Amino acid sequence: MACSTNYLWRGEATWFCCGAAWGPCGSAGGGACGNCRSASNHGAWPNASAACWDITRPDLCGEGGIPRRGCGAVMRVVQECSKAAVCITITDCGPRTKSFCGEAACCNGVCRTNRILDLTPAAYSQIASLSSGKTGVWIYE
């Protein structure tokens, strides 16, 4: 999987469970793409498809320009403060951005708002502690 340095978006990232039981996760579905796994570097993007967009509605939080990136899209996710990075593959639709408008993750006085990316525990733990629950990120493709 090739990770790029072409800026795509920035915002808040959280983590979620999918696929077989792993780490803090019990068994869960395979996500919108059918191949999501908590033990892999996977993620959920709010504009993975038109149907996904109808569920997540990031535009209701002022994130209307998020580009469509579907199943199999590769993204490089960089944590705001530590600059730790992980390469992920989109395997699901999410997060439901409209339910978290204005939610913020801050570090060193810089805050990122609105959930715009969900990462599997394997991916999230490479950039932040799972116990943090949310973190500010920059996303590249």
Image (tube, rainbow, N blue to C red):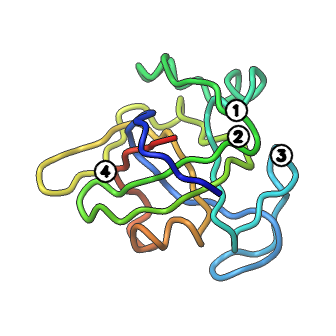
Q: Which of marks 1 and 3 precedes in the sequence?
A: 3
Q: Which of marks 2 and 4 precedes in the sequence?
A: 2
| Disc 4 versus disc 3: nearer the observer | 3
- Indicate whether 123 appears above or below 107: below
Inter-mark Cα distance, 3 to 2: 8 Å
Indicate which disc residue 48 carries.
Answer: 1
| Disc 1 versus disc 2: nearer the observer | 1
Residue 36 percent location from the top left of the image? 77, 58
Q: Is 68 left or right of 8, judged from the image as shown?
A: right
Indicate which disc residue 33 carries.
Answer: 3
Indicate which disc residue 105 carries.
Answer: 4
Q: Residue at x 59, y 72 (%)?
A: 122
Inter-mark Cα distance, 3 to 1: 9 Å
Q: Residue at x 53, y 52 (%)?
A: 3
Q: The residue under label 3 is which amino acid type?
A: Cys
The residue that label 2 is drawn on is 93
User: In the structure shown, which secondary structural element does the residue marked by tag 1 occupy?
Assistant: loop
Q: Residue at x 42, y 31 (%)?
A: 101
| Disc 3 versus disc 2: nearer the observer | 3
